[in-house]
Image: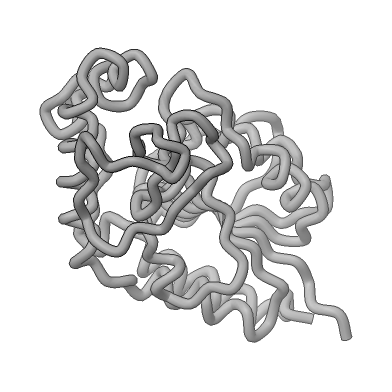
Amino acid sequence: MKKLKLVVLSGAGISAESGLATFRGSDGLWEGHRVEDVATPEGWRKNRELVLEFYNQRRKQAIEAKPNRAHLLVKELEKDFEVVVITQNVDHLHELAKSKKIIHLHGQLFQSRSTKNPDAIFEMSGWELKVGDLAPDGSQLRPNIVWFGEAVPMMDVAVEEVSNADILIVIGTSLQVYPAASLVDYVPGSCKIFLVDPGAVQVSGSRKVIHIQQPATLGMEIVLKTLREKGDTD
């Protein structure tokens, strides 16, 4: 029997329990920096050293992180469902949890890319990227991160995945960052939607959403139990 298609949309909340808090603080700053200075093309043109060091420190922190129970439960869902993970996170915790199909909307922290050719992407073995580190085409390497003001290359792929989902699980995202937040608008009317987040999250439209107001790890335990008790794995 063909498995139901389950799409997971994950945000910073799932990685927070692995010690990786969202970059943006309550004061709107990213680790003490203005977003415009470290996460925009303008910031890159103004001060490459600052931007590279900002992401070096994020990598240095992330390289020690391990997947938590929520990441592992997302992987476990593959026993019963056809699972696609769409993540707003740039860390590699879903990869470390061995999820099979992962779409990174905002790029990947442990990748660099050419500043001439956005399709020339390279895996990083360590945490440091410096001024003078060049791509084969001779251009300076930059983090493979989708900055504010840049297009989201994987958005069309993500829309296609959610458009034929039977179940959508949204974990640890406030659904405030666009265009990622708009993915909920593309799910079929018959799609069951679970929202795992301890806060009050506003979902656009009139869709019925099962909101589990718990952190990612506990919330995913509840989702998995609910799906199995209700027989949604068939």
Say which of 107 and 52 sits in front. 52
Examine the rendered structure and indicate whether residue 207 appears above or below residue 98: above
Examine the rendered structure and indicate whether residue 123 appears above or below residue 78: above
Which percent across, then down, holds residue 128? 20, 50
Q: Quadrant of the C terminus?
A: bottom right
Which percent across, then down, holds residue 15? 32, 57
Q: Left or right of 158: which side holds 74?
A: left
In the rendered picture of this protein, how many numbered marks are placed on residues? 0
Give the image quarter of residue 26: top left
Q: Left or right of 74: which side holds 161?
A: right
Q: Going by the picture, which residue comes out furthest to the right?
A: 1
Which percent across, then down, holds residue 178? 54, 28
Q: Left or right of 62: which side holds 68?
A: right
Give the image quarter of residue 143: top left
Q: Quadrant of the N terminus?
A: bottom right
Q: Going by the picture, which residue comes out furthest to the left?
A: 32
Q: Residue at x 73, y 50 (%)?
A: 162
Say which of 113 and 226 sits in front. 113
Which percent across, then down, holds residue 50? 16, 27
Examine the rendered structure and indicate whether residue 95 appears above or below residue 114: below
Examine the rendered structure and indicate whether residue 198 appears above or below residue 215: above
Q: Residue at x 39, y 73 (%)?
A: 96
Q: Residue at x 19, y 45 (%)?
A: 56
The colour scheme applied to this rendered structure is: one colour
